[in-house]
Amino acid sequence: MASGERQHPARHVPERRCVLCRASRPRPELVRLVVRQGQFHLDQSGRAPGRGAYVCADQHCWQERRVLKALGAQLWTELQMSRAR
């Protein structure tokens, strides 16, 4: 390394845990759901206000009954699925 050059460490990627299968994964590999006005919304920006929970993007985690049960417990409310705009 030449004098005056810095070696930058690898950028930290935050990990989150899927509320359904409990797998820890990098945040970009998960889908964030938030509760707003009594409904679930997909948080595509990752910055929506409200209490959120992360779910794997894998299809096996998205069985509706399983999702509603786990997320209802995680977010403390019974909700309907709705896509955020």
Image: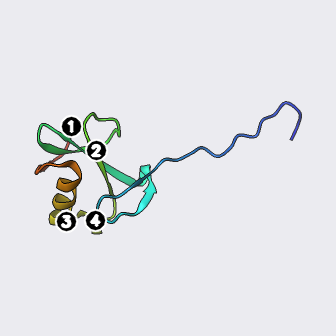
What secondary structure is marked by label 2? Answer: strand
What secondary structure is marked by label 4? Answer: helix
What secondary structure is marked by label 3? Answer: helix
For residue 61, the mark is: 4
Of residues 55 and 51, which is closer to you in this image? 51
Residue that extends furthest to the bottom in the rendered view of this protein:
60
Name the residue carrying label 3: 66
- Which residue sits at x=17%, y=54%? 72
Mark 3 and mark 4 lie on one chain; the one further toward the N terminus is 4
Quadrant of the drawing holding the N terminus: top right
Indicate the position of residue 52 as horizontal and vertical percent values.
28, 44
Using the numbered discs, state the Cα–Cα distance from disc 3 to disc 4 in whole angstroms: 8 Å
Q: Are marks 3 and 4 in contact (CB under 8 Å)?
A: yes
For residue 52, the mark is: 2
Using the numbered discs, state the Cα–Cα distance from disc 3 to disc 1 in whole angstroms: 24 Å
Name the residue carrying label 1: 85
Q: Is residue 58 above or below residue 40?
A: below
For residue 48, the mark is: none
Q: Amino acid at mark 4?
A: Cys
Q: Are marks 3 and 1 in contact (CB under 8 Å)?
A: no
**Mark 4 neighbour class, 10 Å CA radius: few under 14, some 14 to 19, many 20 or more:** some
Of residues 67 and 83, which is closer to you in this image? 67
Indicate the position of residue 5 as horizontal and vertical percent values.
81, 34
